[in-house]
Amino acid sequence: MIDRSATLGQGSQATVAQSAVQGIVPQPRTRLVEQALIFVAMVTLPLENHLPTVAGMSASFLIFTALGAYVIMNRPRALGRVWQHPVFIAAYVFIGVSALLEFSSPLSSYSEVFRFGSMIGGAVFLSAICRDRSGLAAGLYGYIVAALWVSVFLFLTSYGVVKGMGQVGDFHEASKVRAEAFGDMGLQANINALAFSCTQGAVVAFTLALVGNVKSRRILFFGIATFCLVASFLPMSRGAAVITIVSFAVVLYAHGFRHGNVLILASILGVSIYMVVPDAVWSRMAYSTETRSGKMEGRAWIYTTALNRLPEYVVAGVGAGNYYKKWGVEKGFAREHGGVVTVAGSHNSLLQITIFWGVLSLLLYLWIVWCVYRSIPLRCGRDELSLALLGIIVSLSLWMCESHGFYDKWFACGLGLLVGARQWIWPRGVVLAVEGGEVSPLS
């Protein structure tokens, strides 16, 4: 294992030294107020739909607005550097083209474009204040704390109900158990998003347990990872389960299997999950296109309908406003719930973008994804912060295929930390060895 800096100061000095070598003007290290802004943005993100709004603006939007105001007033030079990053340039082009295509469609509505633009703006501001290892560590610890409080909530509200159901027969019965367990929960948030929050925190905590020489610290983070990982299965989200497995596998692969403790930790974690997760959860991990009582399972219904209607939207899309106001209702994307007809999203960002604005916008969005991939520093398996960041980016890439909310603030957080880390911490695009011993990001 390659040694890393012993303190935050040494880590920041190494970053400045790397910048100076390349002729980049060194930026001041991340201040405590900036670390606090990053940390709060992460911790409060799962509460976005629960906290009261102010003039129609969510708490997360207000936090990112405050972050943006701080950056504009105090860090204009840093902002001037990061806003031109290739990830953001690709995003600007996507916004412009999608807005033009929306303008050309009937019943135009620019709310989706505006939300995506706001998400990119938040990522730009976040990357401007994540300028060293302490800033990146604050964000990663924010993921862990957010996952912890969501996990506690899920255990207190649903574990007993799900556990008491024992083994259920199939997917449909498991879905009834899920509805009963979460029907009256106090937190007004998407159930799958809560599971995703736990997954991201578990990935970060597991990485910190995997890479390090301080035994007590590794044990602490391994316990947190196990707790959050079990909680991520309680909402019975199939997507979250897939995201968990793939994200952990990528982290393990990037770190390498040179050390026996890697396989030991992974085995213990797998056994713990199998023993503690209620049996009813595993019954909902199936996927089927078969109908029951005249209805097809929700996700299969959406995908089947989208495939059948492909020729009608693949070229230029139908427009976001038109989709939700008229086209989606007429073409079979709507269902009635309690007397109210609701048009469903596609549960897939790539598919939703294609339906909205066609193949051109899809290609531009994939350009953003490609730029994100190119921004991941090489040799990230040698450093705990870069390895944890890799886990976050992988989980977001999979979440993109699970949710149609391509403008989610989860993406703003991940993109902001990645671009900031690439711009300021690893400007060469390679995670370099740093003189010193064990890094303790927040010590």
Image (tube, rainbow, N blue to C red):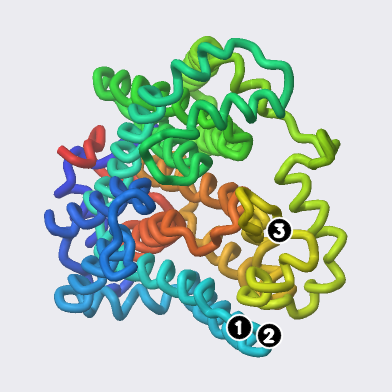
Q: How far apart are marks 3 and 1 (CA)?
A: 19 Å
Element marked by disc 2: loop
Query: Which of the two labelled residues, at mark 3 and mark 1, occupies the earlier sequence position?
Result: 1
Residue 9 disc label: none
Q: Distance between the residues labelled 2 and 3?
A: 20 Å
- Asked if residue 329 lies left or right of residue 264, the reply is right
Q: Check disc 3 and report the residue beneath it.
A: 334
Residue 105 disc label: 2
Could one spot residue 202 in this view of the protein? yes
Residue 141 placement (x, y as % from top left): 28, 41
Of the residues shown, which amino acid type is indicated by label 1? Ser
Please give the count of numbered marks on the rendered protein: 3
Q: Residue at x 29, y 52 (%)?
A: 51
Residue 263 placement (x, y as % from top left): 52, 18
Q: Residue at x 24, y 49 (%)?
A: 39
Of the residues shown, which amino acid type is indicated by label 3? Ala
Q: Which residue is drawn at 83% across and 66% down?
A: 310
Query: Which of pointers 2 and 3 indicates the residue nearer the eye?
Result: 3
Residue 354 placement (x, y as % from top left): 71, 69
- Tags 2 and 1 in contact by the CB under 8 Å rule? yes
Q: Residue at x 56, y 79 (%)?
A: 109
Residue 369 placement (x, y as % from top left): 58, 63
Q: How far apart are marks 2 and 1 (CA)?
A: 6 Å
Local crowd at mark 3 within 10 Å, few (<14), some, or many (≥20)? some
Q: Check disc 1 and report the residue beneath it.
A: 108
**Quadrant in which the C terminus appears:** top left
Of the residues shown, which amino acid type is indicated by label 2? Ser
- Tags 2 and 3 in contact by the CB under 8 Å rule? no
Element marked by disc 3: strand
Could one spot residue 261 in this view of the protein? no
- Asked if residue 297 lies left or right of residue 368, the reply is right
**Quadrant in which the N terminus appears:** top left
